[in-house]
Image (cartoon, rainbow, N blue to C red):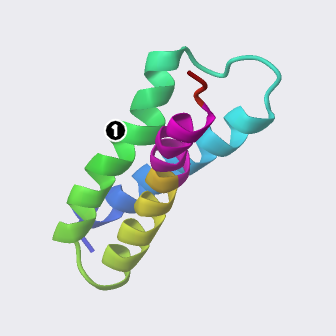
């Protein structure tokens, strides 16, 4: 297994742990722009790399990075439309 095949899983673990820990910390874990990079942009990069990987790493990379991207980016973006009052 080459090193490029491990990167999507590492990106998934880093972004998932960052998002999970930031939900339970009383203050800010990182500034806003760093959190956007770690929880939205990093999983997008992980998805691109996962499509180039093989076998189990591909499946874990795609599902894991999509899950983090969905929970950290897509759900908050959609909920902003419903909870925003005129």
- In this rendering, position of residue 78 left or right of residue 55: right
Q: Quadrant of residue 29?
A: top right
Relative to the observer, which residue lies in front, 71 or 85?
85
Q: Is residue 82 magenta?
A: yes
Residue picked out by circle 1: 41
Q: Secondary structure at mark 1?
A: helix
Q: Quadrant of residue 84?
A: top right
Q: Is residue 17 above or below residue 83?
A: below
- Residue 16: give x, y in percent of width and height: 57, 50
- Name the residue furthest left: 52
Quadrant occupied by the N terminus: bottom left
Q: Quadrant of residue 4?
A: bottom left
Quadrant occupied by the C terminus: top right
Q: Is residue 57 above or below residue 22?
A: below
Relative to the observer, which residue lies in front, 29 or 67?
67
**Which residue is pictured at 50% across the width and 61% down the height?**
67
- Residue 83: give x, y in percent of width and height: 62, 34
Dominant SS type (magenta): helix
Q: Is residue 22 magenta?
A: no
Relative to the observer, which residue lies in front, 19 or 6?
19
**What is the magenta range?**
71-83
**Which residue is pictured at 55% across the width and 51% down the height?**
71
């Amino acid at each position: 297994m080459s090193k490029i095949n491990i990167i999507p899983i590492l990106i998934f673990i880093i972004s998932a742990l960052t998002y999970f820990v930031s939900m339970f910390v009383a203050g800010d874990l990182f500034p806003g722009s760093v959190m956007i990079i770690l929880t939205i942009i990093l999983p997008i990069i992980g998805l691109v790399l996962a499509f180039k990987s093989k076998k189990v790493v591909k499946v874990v990379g795609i599902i894991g990075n999509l899950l983090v991207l969905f929970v950290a980016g897509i759900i908050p973006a959609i909920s902003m439309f419903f909870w925003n009052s005129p």
